[in-house]
Image (cartoon, grey):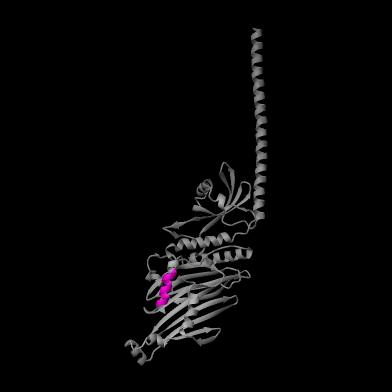
Amino acid sequence: MKKIIQLLLVMVLMLGGISESLVTVYSQDNDTNEAYKAYYKFLDNLIYGDDKDGGGIGVYSSKLSDPINENIKQEKGIIYAGLGDLDNDENKDLVCMYLNGDNYYNLEVYDFKKGKLNKVFSTRQPLNIGLQDSNSISTVHKGEKTYIGTYEYLKKDMGFDEVYKFYDFKGKSIDVENLEISCNLTLEQQKDVVDKKVDQSQFYTYKQTKNNSTKKLKKEKFEDILDSYQQGETFLMEHSSGTFYTQLDLNRNSEQINEFLVSLLIESMPRYSFEDVDDTISDSPKLKKFLTTSMKEEISKPQIKKAYEIEDGYYYLAINGKKSVQGKLETSPDVYFAVVKNTGSGDFKMLRLENKPFNNEDDIKSYISKLKDEGTSNEKTKNNIILKYKKVIIGVLALLILFILFFFIRKINNKNKK
């Protein structure tokens, strides 16, 4: 059975990637926006710590081409974060797995209901296990359902225990299906197995525990049930024979976690009815150059994640950039919200740059209207000042002309007298 698991792992690795249902971020309403805000705040604090004392666990990264480093037992860092509707209530739940330096890898599931972040599930697997033992944590997609799966293989002197657990989320409750293979040999049976008189598998016992009821199964039935789960299984972490494996690309983990946090921030924005111009203005070379120059003090390599056209020539942008040292995140990802104006010929002017979005589109409209009113008022003031200076200049010129005329007339009179 253990070989079957390892074969399945290799097959799934070849197919690659985590199911899209666990990593796609989308927003539908204000409640969802608030959920994403709460998920972001929780992950930001977990990874980077609070503003005063820090103390975050960071992001765990490893080379994809190698098994995960043995030092993982002492290391800290988030391994995975994603979204999935585990209880089919049409609301996204947060799934995260991390190391905390305590010789365990931990998986937790959170939801957001009634304005509150709630931990609805947690499990952990030990990192210090025997060389012949194994364990894993996985996500499992079976039909329309997503489950959390755990696996433990414990070698004993006279046999072994192998336990699969699949957690089915149902709102206020979680159903657990246990599939267990056990082998407990007598001394005589063990001798016969060693002498190859019998195959050890004939002493295996197959059990299923569901709804607090345990029953023995035939091998074929047991494997059919197990296979129905394993066909959609993705290993977030597997510890086998003293070696750690994962189907996650931990070589890019820092970048992927940053992208996920940014997506939570962007999707937590209020919903606006303005025209979405992501596909048009976001690729403007002049706008990209303008943002790179004007935002160099805030972030490098700014990327437009969301773009709205408020009205002709005025745009509202959600912008993300990078602050990194040797590929590792220094701080929480930065997202800025900018109002820019197209001043003509593709040139732009920054009107507002904040790290918090407007609360609603009425605030944006009021802001633009105020800018226009101020612009009109400033233009009137400018024109009045120009008119005033024109009058002064005309008066000075008139006096100068009168002075020149007076001078010439006087000079002519003096000449006539002579």
Tell me the quadrant of the picture where the N terminus can be found: bottom left
| Predominant SS of the magenta segment | helix
Q: Is residue 5 magenta?
A: yes
Q: Nearer the viewer, residue 343 or 325?
A: 343
What span is in magenta? Answer: 3-12
Q: Residue furthest bottom?
A: 188
With respect to residue 313, does 165 lie above or below?
below
For the point 64% across and 19% down, the residue is: 404
Q: Quadrant of residue 398?
A: top right
- The image shows residue 103 at horizontal and vertical percentages of 42, 75
- The image shows residue 156 at horizontal and vertical percentages of 39, 85
For the point 44% across and 79% down, the residue is: 152
- The image shows residue 383 at horizontal and vertical percentages of 66, 36
Q: Residue furthest front?
A: 220
Q: Nearer the viewer, residue 100 or 17?
A: 17
For the point 51% across and 59% down, the residue is: 333
- The image shows residue 71 at horizontal and vertical percentages of 38, 70
Q: Residue furthest top?
A: 418
Q: Is residue 201 left or right of residue 362?
A: left
Q: Is residue 355 magenta?
A: no
For the point 37% across and 75% down, the residue is: 242
Q: Quadrant of residue 245?
A: bottom left
Q: Quadrant of residue 305?
A: bottom right
Q: Is residue 102 left or right of residue 169?
A: left
With respect to residue 42, does 397 lie above or below?
above
Q: Nearer the viewer, residue 404 or 116?
A: 116
